Image (cartoon, helix red, strand yellow):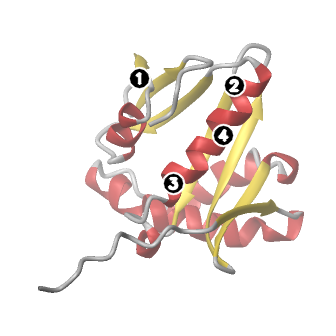
Amino acid sequence: MPTISPPKQERVSLTPVHENDAEELVALRIEAMRDSLMQIDRFDPDRARARFLSGFCPERTRHIDTDGKRVGFVVVQPQADTLLLDHLYIRPGSQGRHIGSLVLARIIEEANSQGLPVRVGALRGSDSNRFYLRHGFTLVGQQEFDNYYLRPCGEAHE
């Protein structure tokens, strides 16, 4: 009888981003968002690029690396009463390996250590909505294209 091995545990590290990484991050964001935006007929690479670059802050941005490969990035913005998870993107070819869950667990730990809830927005219809609900976020608002979620401080992460 063949044995079944458990899925490989990814080694995920978050590393600093520099100003000159902006174009690489824009390309990754566009790659990760393409399908979701096309489903709602809102895919516009020029708009996506301009929108990201207008708020780009290297000090708040970290690369997501697994075993020496850059597979995504995360942006966390401290606010007065929450941590805003502004961006969390994983390259499509690296999705489904629990990398996003590992990164999100770290962000939640950071928020808990600061006594803050985590706030996030997700494109309506995107798979990311199920992802955030699975990780203890609650829907707190909606706009035309986005859903907004909040995860209270101190709750255990699955």
According to the image, label 1 marks what residue? 143
Residue located at (69% from left, 25% from top) = 112
Question: Which numbered disc flags the more N-terminal residue, 2 or 1?
Answer: 2
The kind of residue on which mark 1 rests is Gln
> Can you give x and y, in whole percent of width and height, for residue 116 in the image?
70, 19
Q: Pointer 4 and pointer 2: residues touching (CB < 8 Å)? A: no
Q: Residue furthest bottom?
A: 2
Residue matched to label 4: 107
| Mark 4 vs mark 1: in front | 4
N-term-proximal mark, 4 vs 3? 3
Where, quadrant-wise, is the C terminus in this rendering?
top left
Q: Does the residue at mark 2 contact the one at mark 3 (Cβ under 8 Å)?
A: no
> Tag on residue 112?
2
Mark closest to the chain's N terminus, 4 or 2: 4
Residue with the most extreme front position: 1
**In front: mark 2 or mark 3?**
2
Residue at 32% across, 48% down: 127
Tag of residue 100 = 3
Q: Quadrant of the N terminus?
A: bottom left
Q: Secondary structure at mark 4?
A: helix
Mark 4 to mark 2: distance in Å?
Answer: 9 Å
Q: Earlier in the sequence, mark 1 or mark 3?
A: 3
Q: Position of residue 86 (x, y in %)?
A: 63, 39
Q: Quadrant of residue 153?
A: top right
